[in-house]
Amino acid sequence: MADAVAMAKANEPVPDMVKQFVVYFYRHIREKNVYEILSMYEKSFSAISERYFKASPWPSVEAVARFADNDHVFCLLYKEMYFRHVYSKVTPTLEQRCESWDNYCALFGVILHGNVNMQLPNLWLWEMVDEFIYQFQSFCQYRGKLSVKTKEELALLKECDQVWNVVGVLNYLQALVDKSDICGVLEAERGAGPESFTDTEGYATHSSNVLRTLGYFSLIGLHRVHVLLGDYTTALKVLDPIDLDKPGIFTKVAGAAVSTAYHVGFAYFMSKRYTDAIRHFNASLVFINRHKVGATRPYSLDLLLKKQEQMYALVAMCVTLGGGGGSGSAMTSVMRLLEEGVVGTLRERHGDDMSRMGQSVVSAYDELFSYSCPKFVTPAPPAGAAGVEEGAGGATNYNEEAYRLQLRLFLSEVASFDKLPTLRSFLKLYTTISVAKLADLMETDAAALMQQLTCMKHKSRCMEWRGGGSALGGG
């Protein structure tokens, strides 16, 4: 049966434009012509997709393999692009999700355990890691929507419990980091001269760049997965080998730069380090404004602009909370961390939201958090998923559990700011004032007031990262 299906796929018609693309793409990969590979990957593939496959998949790998000498590694690379196109144009089936997982396992297996001598563009290597995590995230979202699945779909899903498993995803990313020895490379080059990994952008004359650069981007990938899981301390710790305040390979690839800034900023935001979050968001917003004009692919520009809008919403919350939860001189001081253009756009888009948040309107925080946060995932399938009946539960969506948990954590922090603007305004009115009188003005008792004063003391101190070393560090 499987042989018959494979034979049928091999006999699929292939447009001449696709034949030509595969022949030349395969040739350039064999010849390690990075510039031509990049051009075909970034421009030709998108152009052909737009013209011939706007709402349908590319020809199967079985149909095109003969135009690339049935090369095993090329077929894995082709399928990586094939499934990425499927995800971008249509809703993938469970079978396609499983096939894409199997293909990534095979591709990473070859890179980890084979003798790979290719040179691939950094853009492709970044997007390989980026797509791997996106498809993991997508599968978690798909898996959590139990109420819309039939009994047959639930049964199939139960059989795929190892597909896009969080442990498997983390293990592959960690294996790429370990096998590439990228942590050792980055540590050594902190005191090195020219021809270091960063200076050469990972490309080497006599060896492949694939494993080492994939290992580098996998550090960022691990960081992102831990953010999606809500483990912000581990997320920041993972990035210790990378100097986030200096130019690096991730800053040369627009998608990597923006993704890193967004997730690092969000990790700082949820860690109550609003100044550090603002610095990362501000740098990324300036970066996007400079690079969006030169974007070569419409869909990548859309992704950058989406992240831009999310970061403006996060900055609005950071400015309010970093200013003590209210308006005035404290908020003005925080705003000085932002570029003038960013400040103007922020006031234009979120001026009303910031005013509402300054008045402790919780719904304003709720709305902005919902819009700007990543799509959190749960590390395990829903308990008892196999026992859910077809259509049961009406709107059962287990993805909401992860989001609701992070929202509760955030809103509990917001609640701690509730009385601070009023308390601060009273303290400004008096040179000295007794606890009893201040408690009376605040309409509370002395014990509760002391808690609020302690809270204000802690909120007025914010650990800041000084660059270099661990992203968790600061003073």
Image (spheres, grey):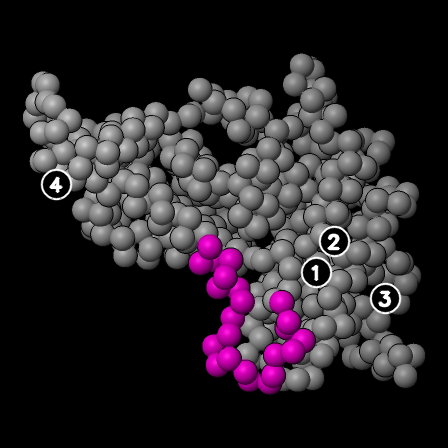
10 Å crowding of disc 1: few (<14), some (14-19), many (20+): many
Identity, as a three-letter code, of the amino acid under mark 3:
Ala
| Residue displayed at 10% across by 19% down | 432
10 Å crowding of disc 3: few (<14), some (14-19), many (20+): some
- Left or right of 104 on screen, residue 300: left
Which residue was labeled with disc 2? 168
The answer to which of 189 and 177 lies nearer the viewer is 177
Which residue was labeled with disc 1? 164
- The stretch of residues the image draws in magenta is 383-405
Q: Nearer the viewer, mark 3 or mark 4?
A: 4
Circles 2 and 1, Cβ within 8 Å, touching? The answer is: yes
10 Å crowding of disc 2: few (<14), some (14-19), many (20+): few
Identity, as a three-letter code, of the amino acid under mark 2:
Gly
> Does residue 376 sit above or below 321 in this rendering?
below
| Residue displayed at 75% across by 47% down | 171
Identity, as a three-letter code, of the amino acid under mark 1:
Trp
- The number of discs equals 4
Which residue was labeled with disc 3? 65
Q: Nearer the viewer, mark 4 or mark 1?
A: 4
Real-space Cα distance between discs 2 and 4? Answer: 54 Å
